[in-house]
Image: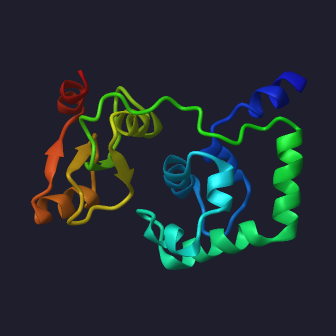
Amino acid sequence: MIDAIENSKKNSIDKLICALGIRYIGAKSAKTLAKKYKAIDNLINATLEDLIETEDVGEKTAKSVYEFFKQDQTKDLIDKLTIAGVNMVDTSSAVKDERFINKTFVLTGSLQKYTRDEASKIIEDFGGKTTGSVSKKTNYLLAGEDAGSKLTKAQELGIEIISEEQFEEMIK
């Protein structure tokens, strides 16, 4: 158990941001904030305007983050976590291969070779992002078996639909 606690201190800052319990912040928003701000101190010092301008962060979420970090108990918590040795900076390697930069993927259906988390990580490692719903901004729909309404919507919007095999070709 002690080893698990020590290892958790090395987690990426997106996991820390998510774990802080900030209202409206889930795993995806936490990744977005971690990617932009690179360190908890940068996030703490961000202005409300900076937060609002962050991609995929709306005004309500930005205000929630801003107000969270202005609270005395949050400052105390961050100080305690720092003293305990919890990682407060982005230690992930920078995106080296940007083949999916500015590309948005939606995953649907059952994938055979990857879990959704694995496929999302691959996309993010190549500079892309994933979302949960199809829109005009979607570039690719990665469709596995038994794809449902997302596939129909992608077809209606003329979104490029790719199979798992095509995805594998794209990531080679």
Quadrant location of the N terminus?
A: top right
- At 74% from the left and 56% from the top, the residue drawn is 20
Which quarter of the picture shows residue 83? top right
Residue 169: % across, % down? 18, 25
- At 36% from the left and 48% from the top, the residue drawn is 129
In the rendered view, how is the structure colored?
rainbow
In this picture, is 165 found above or below 53?
above
In front of the other: 125 or 36: 36
Residue 144: % across, % down? 28, 40
Q: So how many labels did they put on this image?
A: 0
Residue 55: % across, % down? 41, 62
Quadrant location of the C terminus?
A: top left
Extreme residue toward the left, this view: 158
Which quarter of the picture shows residue 70? bottom right
In this picture, is 99 found above or below 73?
above
In this picture, is 130 found above or below 162?
below
- At 27% from the left and 56% from the top, the residue drawn is 148
- At 27% from the left and 59% from the top, the residue drawn is 150
In front of the other: 7 or 142: 7
In front of the other: 43 or 172: 43
Residue 145: % across, % down? 28, 40
**In the image: residue 130, left or right of residue 80:** left
